[in-house]
Structure formats: structure tokens, C-alpha cells
Image (tube, rainbow, N blue to C red):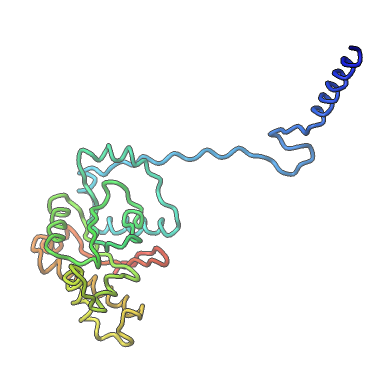
Amino acid sequence: MLRILTTIALAAGSFFFLSSCQPVTKNEPSAGSDSVVKPAAPEQPPLKEKVLTKAEQEALTPDMVIQSLQAGNQRYVRNDLTKRDHSALVREAAEGQYPKAVILSCLDSRVTVEDVFDKGIGDLFVGRVAGNFVNIDMLGSMEFGCKVSGAKLILVMGHEFCGAIKSAIDNVKLGNITAMLEKIRPAVLRSMDFKGEKTSKNPAFVEYVAMNNIRYAIEYIRKNSPILKEMEDKGQIKIIGAYYKLTTGEVIFL
């Protein structure tokens, strides 16, 4: 019996000794350590921007809207986008909308219009179609955006490496795409004065056609919408073009 008690006592002592030899982990750095663990900085809450009111929209001029888009694009290029409380803005904008501009963009998934101009909910009307061309449906949407809802600017924005432009150059024939590309073909035809290889494999020619496509769309708007033409003539709106560089994020205003 004595031998059993002695064995138990020795085992308990060994366990205590081994336990006491284990390293002690602490959150604080050990003495003499050069590293200091700093608490993580609290994340800044998103800004709760105020949705534009009718009075604020009416006070804007077309040039003020252009400057706002340019400044927003500069922030985008710097990767300095405004933090927004989108949930709050959705609820605030539910009662009505008073956007600053109508932007016609290509369908391309790489051209995220609101991000490109650092704008939020209720700031922009955005129409999208492959090749950013204008038809009667888009014209009606623009008339609604400007004449009915008070937007001060129409911006037609093409972009670098546009697949629709390349397809129009190649005169692609495929389903409904064929009829769609016919809306872009006028820009291809007016680009035949280009000095160089006139194929979709030449990025310079693709860009040249894209620029002419933007200009053709603007001409189409003025010619086929007396409402928008009159508003522009009176200085109530401006109709301009822009070209988005996928490689840099920069928007070049034409």
C-alpha cells in the first residue's frame, strides 16, 4: 500500500513539474522585443450622402455637372472612391429621383458607369447597349431623363477595346446581332479616311471608329430629337461625348 501511494505521489509531482515548464503565452510582447502589437484601427463608417433634391438639381448647370463627373473620375483613377451608405440612400431616394445626367454607355461589363464617375444612387440615369448607339427607345429615355426629370447633361461614352466596334468593323452576321451592328456601321464607313490598317486587329483603327461612333451618336440625338435639340440650344442641357480607357480608368471628354 505504501508503494502505491509513493508511486501516485511521484506521478503527481512529475505532472506538476512538466506543466510548470510549458511556455506562457501572452498578448504583450516579451521584454526586449522590438515588435509592438498595435490594435487595429477602427474601420471608418460609410458616408451617408444626401440624395439630390429637386431644388438642388435645378440649381445645377451643365458645366457644373461636367466638372462633377470629371472630379469623380479623378477619384476613381486614384482608387479613392467615396464610401456610401447605400442602404440609407436607397430608402431616401424611394420617394423620387433628380439625377444630374443621362449617360449612354456600352453594355461592356468592364465599364461600371457609377464607379467610373464615383456617383451613387439617384445621381445618374444610365442607358446601356452594345456599341453605345442611339435608337428611338434610347432617344425617348433621354427625353424622359432631361425634359421630364430635369437632368442637365447627356453624355455618350464609348470605350477602349470595344467588342461591338470590332464586330461592326468585321461586319459580323449572327442572329439579332447583325441588325444591331447596322447601327454602328455608319461610324465604320466614315472612318475609311484612316491612314493605316483598317481591320479589327489594329487597336488604333478600332479606337478611331469608336470615336467616330460617339460623334455619330451625338449627331443622331440632335437630328432626331427636336426636344433635346431645343433644350441644348437654350443652354438647359449639353450633349457631349467621352471615351473610357480600360487600361487606366481615365475618361477622356471629347
161 up-or-down from 19: above or below: below
Image-quadrant location for residue 111: bottom left
Q: Position of residue 236 (x, y in %)?
A: 16, 57
Determine the residue located farthest toward the front in the rendered image: 1
Q: Position of residue 124 (x, y in %)?
A: 26, 52
* Image label count: 0
Q: Nearer the viewer, residue 183 or 57?
A: 183
Image-quadrant location for residue 24: top right
Q: Nearer the viewer, residue 207 or 25?
A: 25
Determine the residue located farthest toward the left in the rendered image: 226
Q: Nearer the viewer, residue 91 or 170?
A: 170
27 up-or-down from 150: above or below: above
Quarter of the N terminus within the rendering = top right
- Report whether 212 appears left or right of 71: left
Q: Position of residue 84 (x, y in %)?
A: 37, 43
- Report whether 59 appears left or right of 47: left
Q: Position of residue 16 (x, y in %)?
A: 82, 24
Image-quadrant location for residue 238: bottom left
- Report whether 226 appears left or right of 29: left
Q: Residue at x 31, y 63 (%)?
A: 108
77 up-or-down from 192: above or below: above
Quarter of the C terminus within the rendering = bottom left
Q: Residue at x 11, y 63 (%)?
A: 136
